[in-house]
Image (cartoon, coloured by chain):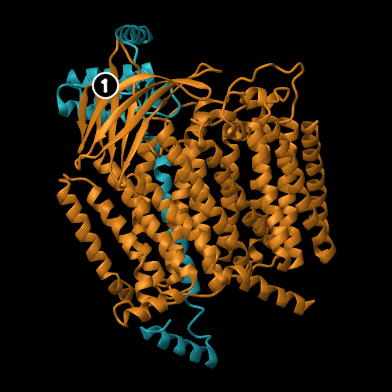
Chain colours: A orange, B cyan
Amino acid sequence: MPIELGHFALILAFAIASVAAIGGFTFWRSGERIAQFVSQAALLQFVLTAVAFVALIQAFIVSDFSLALAANNSNPVIPLLFKISGVWGNHEGSMLLWILILVGFGAMVAVFGKNLPRDLLTLVLAMQALLTAAFTGFTIFTSNPFWRLSPAPLQGSDLNPVLQDVGLAIHPPLLYVGYVGFSICFSFAIAALISGRIDGAWARWVRPWAILSWLFLTLGIAMGSYWAYYELGWGGWWFWDPVENASFMPWLAGTALLHSALVMEKRNALKVWTVFLSIITFSLSLLGTFLVRSGILTSVHTFASDPTRGLVILSLLALFIGGAFLLFALRVSSLRLGGLFAPVSREGALILNNLFLATATGAVLVGTLYPLVLDALAGVSISVGPPFFNLTFAVLMSPLLIVLPFGPLLAWKRADVVAAAQRLIAVAALAIFLAVLISALSGVTISMAPIGLLLGFWVAFGAFAELVERGRIGRIPPMDSVRRLAGLPRTTWATAIAHFGVGVTVLGIVATSAWETELVTTLNPGETTTLADYTIAFDSFGPVNGAGFTAEVGTFTVTSTDHSTRQMQAARRTYLASGSQTTEAAIQTYGFSQLYLQLGEAVNGTHVVRLWHKPYITLIWIGALFMAFAGALSLTDRRLRVGVPKRAARQTSGAA
Amino acid sequence: MMGWLRAVLVMVLCLSPMSALAISPDEVLDNPALESRARDISAEIRCLVCQNQSIDDSDADLARDLRLLVRERLVAGDSDDQVRQYLVDRYGEFVLLRPRIEPRTILLWGAAPVLLLAGLLILFFAARRAQPSRPEKLTKEEQTALNDLSRNLADPDRR
């Protein structure tokens, strides 16, 4: 019964979304009444989809195997958390999660957008409703999660063992919030193109949504990277896999969007480009979510590919992306160019940022789709793998990292690059000193590592140059500096922290790529080996029973230079329900570095052990956490939060 | 050709014991220089039966066979390029994770430089177009505002 209730709620949400989309696009000029209608509809879509989602979760919790989805993706023996996260560990359920977040954002616009101009609000919510209608329709008609089985099987087949991890509970929801959040920017862009109204205020409404989505996407990607790192078991943290690229492209485009919307908000320039980026970013999100499910890309994320759905998915993608670009092409001439500025200025620096980020997005897109296209057109299959992406990406990002610290120091409209350079001399000196010192101490031969270190330190320290400048640190009494710093807008702090995070991530990538050490050896219980500064003793090996699996666990004791010891346990699991096996790597964190140990299958009583020392690898994810925190901090800035809608409300009420 | 390939595969498959890890100790060459070259090559060769993994990372049996093949060729005195060519001759361009620069991959390798160049050109012309309309048309008020602005910019303490 609850399942039918959920099914019915989803169908109702589909109907309401359809009506709201048609009504909104037809009567968007009619002011208050239609705005109220689409707002109410947005809230209803959210409530109904939430009911549908809860119905699914409930069926998974009680292991109701009359639900086909639960029978295929769950099992009574797995822990409660994995029963719940198993709801979105498959194509149908993850579609429903995607839609839930989509309507959640629509409801948020309806709640927080009370002060938006009525026609803009109506158009935005109508666009959201159109997206909801399309994707609930797709779900109901081609990927329905509510199908029943009769008779119900007594036992469910298992959730894929790789997915029985806390990563599944966190990674997809974060990533989807990021992907789907950009739909708001997309809808704002469509609304602006239809209504022809686009100015600095538009950018002010869009930017908080862009920041919110970007910060979740940042977290989602970082979480996914760490999950792959510890779960896939060969210690890699980024594989340039098509699906990773699909999540990375909206991130790159979204990062460009954040920066260009800033120019538009402050200086009323770059309007066409910002609207274009809003469309591109969500289009890439759609590509990221659905290209994977169309069955034409293969990757480690194959959980949901089904060629029969491919055609519908590609049609929907073509409809939304193609439609948006058609509208853009038709209406772009109505957008006036905004304020003028000299090439050397804050605007100029942000344009440079956009140039490199957009090029990187394009390069990743071409690299991801090239094998597909070449195969389709010429029948030749080639691989485009990490070597291509690493090279292209490093070449494109290096200039961006070099100019990054200059950006915040340049004035709007026209700036003095020499003055900015003078303020960065100390940063440059410190970065060079550290890069040379570390390279000398670690005995690096000729390689790119010192240059990478230099860039990382340059960006990380350079991020604080603006704070030093504005706090007049060293030029006025320290207490006055503290007072000045505390009084700075939070967005200034957020800029510094986000850029610092970029530098930290670069340092982590460089350090772990250049100084990783690896040991492959045979080891038996009672034997000892050494790697880097650590001594690793294989203590014991034996079977252990877990929740839904049995495991063979190897226990190791690691002694570091300071004679402290820690235990590491690496395992090979066999899952009871499916019989499939996974390896569980053991990871120990020392400071920012990690020791990574993988245990092979025992052959003739001999164990093969693979050990890595990964220096400063955690900086990669810590940097991402800094970026996400900065995003959250800038969202709390008063100017973004309260000031704007209040002022906008005053304007609209004055006009009415 | 295919018969020869099958012969090699059968031979290698029969020789290789069950292995569940990527590179295992018995594969490692005694010569560290050769081994290091083998690792570098392996990292850029695709494991044909896996999802997007290099043979260096994969624990599939075929990946192991390819690793052994790479080492065998190196020991036989092949250069890195000869080893790659050897693999391409047998498995096609698909094994190379770093596609070679050829007529059919020129668009792939050229994409980033071309995009960057196009962006720079667009910016250059946009800047030139924006330039000439500015100087003459300033009114008196605008000129005063501009002067104020320049003065503010010149003042280092301004914020």
Looking at this view, is A544 or A340 the one in front? A544
In the image, residue A604 above or below residue B34: above
Badge 1 sits on which subunit? B
Q: What secondary structure is marked by label 1?
A: helix
Q: Residue at x 55, y 63 (%)?
A: A635
Q: Residue at x 15, y 51 (%)?
A: A440
B10 horizontally vs A259: left or right: left
Is residue A501 something that shows in the picture?
yes
- Look at label 1 and name its amino acid: Val
A143 horizontally vs A377: left or right: right
Instruction: Work out which quarter of the rendered image holds the C terminus of chain A and state it.
Output: bottom right
In the image, residue A302 above or below residue A252: above
Q: Which residue is mark 1?
A: B70
In the image, residue A358 above or below residue A143: below
Looking at this view, is A376 or A299 the one in front? A299
In the image as oriented, which residue stretches furthest toward the front? A564
